[in-house]
Amino acid sequence: MDLRVTSKNVEISDVERQYLEKKLGRLTHHLPNISESTVEITREKTKEPQDRFVVQVTVNSRGTLLRGEVRAPVLTAAIDSVADVLDRQIERFKGRRHGKGRREGERFEEPVGESTDEAEDTARLVKTKHFNVKPMAVDEAIEQMELLGHEFFIFVSTNNNRFNVVYRRRDGQYGLIEPELG
């Protein structure tokens, strides 16, 4: 597994990096197809010590992305918690893949991690993400959106070979946007 670690406002020691590798390495016992993991560790200057360290991990397993994000007062506690979050997500993912999980029309009830979306005072572009897009069915896109814990997901539809967007509606159901060039 290729592990990429980036940090912001904190230096990661060799001991902490080894601890991170050990904890995330255990995920391959449950999901051996993990090709790469991206870890973002941030130390925020907050008044509340319980929100000091933010650890966000994105795991790629054959194009399926799993994401976990946790805040904690101590870096090792955040690493432990995010590994547990990803472990639960892997178990849910494996259950769905083998037919034990979601049935047609059934809603996802379990949250996929903690959200860190905070409103900023000024609206400006602060991050650009690049990702590979593979054609998939709408159901698979919804599952991928839920695994990532997002409110929407952009994908290429196998039905029309065009970019589509699935999103979670306020009533808990899902919507699909099929753009048309005009």
Image: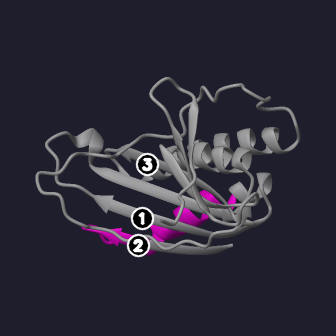
Q: Residue furthest front?
A: 182
Sequence-first disc among 3 and 2: 2
Residue found 55% across the figure and 71% down from its top: 131
At which x and y percent is residue 143? 67, 44
Instruction: Identify which amino acid the numbered label 1 is placed on.
Output: Glu
**How far apart are the alpha carbons under marks 3 and 2?**
15 Å
3 or 2: mark nearer the eye: 2
Residue segment shown in magenta: 6-26
Q: Residue furthest right?
A: 98
Q: Earlier in the sequence, mark 1 or mark 2?
A: 2
Name the image quarter holding the N terminus: bottom right
> Element at badge 1?
strand
Q: Residue at x 39, y 42 (%)?
A: 115
Q: Nearer the viewer, residue 138 or 31?
A: 138
Question: Disc 1, disc 2: CB below 8 Å?
Answer: yes
Q: Is residue 12 visible?
A: no
